């Protein structure tokens, strides 16, 4: 008789709520990870995120080896894998941490159905966020759609609790089942190692976060995003640290939860405007323009540097993400969903809630979004945030030789964007 703990986007042994609870169940715990064919079949064979997940699992497996245990790795369609796991093992309980994306909610319900048929208990836990689902709501119980009051309520509840409880799993490690499952190589999973690597995260470089975070030439942000995406870092530890040391940084972590909460409460935002009044905008959706944007050849250095950073590293600085997103939606009048999909393909930190939330913010179609008449001027953004063109030169080596002409005049694009939005927004 065993308990299965299913790792998904919580790839760590330390301070992991679901694992902490699993290790207190009545049965030895087999840790499990499933490479899901439904997700994998849409990815290139050298996807950097798969390499990152693989390395994180290997790291977990090494820690387990010291306890005479190991992680069970499976690959296939999730439901089929679960059917076979239930035949293979005498499973009594299944533990996992909740995932709030619509696809994951559906998947987990299907697994719970399968388990129910076999009288297996399924227990799921909040681990990915400090406050989930309907924990932070307006007085009338409805979800917040504006960030600042959400943040205030979030902070009020956090301070009321004192801090986020951390879960020390170490004393429970003897409850891992003693097993030696083979650890597959990446080829067996159908992938190759990517040359793109996640930048190591670093909290010392955000000592002056408030002053440095907007300047892409400085290493002024934490690079934690892929770690938060895949759970290699605990959000509770991070928030408790930020609350003591860095309130501006804490506000960004609350933005993350705000968008997770928006996606949970309004799953339609994945492929619809949050504000239906914006459905009438006549996007131009010109494919050649889109290609120039993707390849970083628009002639606007700040836009091009950002897109090249993304293409080469799977990362882009937040300030530049805002500039390129605004440029796509407003200068080129391309539907934000095209940009969102491109980012989803390339970003190592791709997270549906944050990506959709921020894209809709930039397009003006989202909750609490940038007003439609605010059109970033890429040249002014460059002057303000990369005055000496240090960031730009890093990603555009040919910059000093005389750079391409902009593909579209800013004043013209700005007027066209405002007119198009004005005409399209339904009264
Ligand atoms: P830091 O500045 O160190 O921030 C720390 C953490 O706070 C981040 O890791 C992230 O978890 C959270 N955070 C910061 N800013 C935001 C924000 N605006 N929205 C939500 N969470 C935030 N972030 C993603 O994690 N995944 C995405 O797919 C994503 N897509 C984006 C698309 C666009 C168009 C824009 C403008 C922003 C997007 N962001 C996304 C938000 C932000 O750009 C990244 O979180 C940040 O650049 C990651 O770098 P960092 O960890 O060094 O950030």
Image: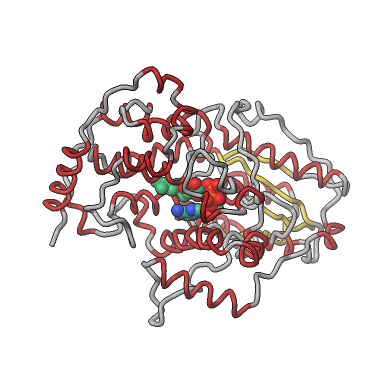
Query: Is 256 located above or below residue 199 in the figure?
Result: below
The structure residue drawn at horizontal position 19% and vertical position 37%, both measured from the top left corner, is 284
Quarter occupied by the C terminus = bottom left
- Quarter-of-image position of residue 329: top left
Residue 170 point in image, percent of width and height: 82, 59
Q: Left or right: 391 with respect to 382?
A: right
Query: Is 54 located above or below residue 163 in the figure?
Result: above
Figure disc tally: 0
Q: Residue furthest bottom?
A: 139
The structure residue drawn at horizontal position 63% and vertical position 38%, both measured from the top left corner, is 52
Residue 351 in sight in this render: no
- Quarter-of-image position of residue 207: bottom right
Residue 340 in sight in this render: yes
Q: Left or right: 306 with respect to 93?
A: left
Quarter occupied by the N terminus = bottom right
Residue 178 point in image, percent of width and height: 86, 49
Q: Left or right: 287 with respect to 233?
A: left
- The front one of 373 and 208 is 208
- The front one of 89 and 96 is 96
Residue 387 point in image, percent of width and height: 42, 38
The structure residue drawn at horizontal position 40% and vertical position 23%, both measured from the top left corner, is 399
């Amino acid at each position: 008789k065993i308990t299965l703990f299913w790792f998904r986007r919580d790839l760590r042994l330390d301070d992991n709520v679901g694992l902490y609870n699993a290790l207190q169940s009545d049965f030895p715990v087999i840790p499990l990870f499933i490479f899901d064919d439904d997700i994998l079949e849409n990815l290139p064979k050298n996807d950097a995120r798969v390499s990152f997940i693989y390395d994180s699992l290997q790291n977990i497996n090494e820690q387990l080896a010291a306890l005479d245990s190991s992680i069970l790795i499976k690959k296939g369609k999730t439901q089929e894998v679960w059917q076979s796991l239930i035949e293979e093992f005498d499973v009594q309980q299944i533990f996992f941490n909740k995932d709030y994306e619509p696809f994951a909610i559906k998947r987990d319900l299907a697994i719970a159905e399968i388990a129910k048929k076999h009288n297996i208990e399924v227990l799921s836990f909040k681990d990915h966020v400090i406050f989930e689902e309907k924990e932070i709501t307006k007085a009338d119980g409805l979800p917040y759609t504006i960030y600042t009051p959400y943040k205030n309520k979030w902070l009020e509840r956090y301070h009321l609790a004192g801090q986020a409880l951390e879960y020390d799993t170490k004393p429970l490690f003897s409850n891992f089942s003693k097993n030696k499952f083979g650890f597959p190589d990446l080829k067996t999973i159908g992938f190759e190692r990517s040359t793109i690597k996640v930048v190591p995260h670093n909290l010392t470089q955000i000592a002056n976060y408030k002053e440095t975070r907007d300047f892409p030439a400085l290493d002024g942000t934490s690079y934690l995003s892929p770690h938060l995406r895949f759970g290699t870092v605990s959000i509770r530890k991070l928030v408790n640290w930020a609350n003591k040391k860095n309130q501006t940084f804490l506000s960004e972590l609350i933005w993350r939860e705000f968008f997770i909460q928006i996606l949970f409460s309004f799953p339609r935002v994945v492929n619809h405007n949050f504000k239906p009044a914006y459905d009438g905008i006549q996007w131009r959706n010109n494919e050649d323009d889109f290609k120039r944007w993707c390849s970083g050849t628009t002639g606007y250095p700040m836009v091009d540097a950002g897109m090249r950073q993304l293409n080469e590293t799977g990362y882009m600085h937040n300030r530049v993400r805002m500039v390129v997103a605004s440029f796509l939606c407003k200068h080129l009048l391309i539907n934000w969903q095209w940009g969102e999909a491109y980012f989803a393909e390339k970003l190592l930190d791709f997270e549906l809630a944050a990506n959709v939330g921020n894209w809709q913010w930039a397009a003006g179609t989202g909750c609490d979004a940038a007003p439609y008449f605010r059109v970033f001027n890429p040249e002014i953004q460059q002057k303000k945030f990369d005055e000496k063109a240090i960031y730009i030169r890093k990603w555009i080596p040919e910059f000093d030789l005389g750079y391409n002409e902009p593909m579209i005049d800013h004043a013209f694009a700005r007027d066209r964007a405002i007119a198009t939005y004005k005409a399209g927004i339904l009264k």
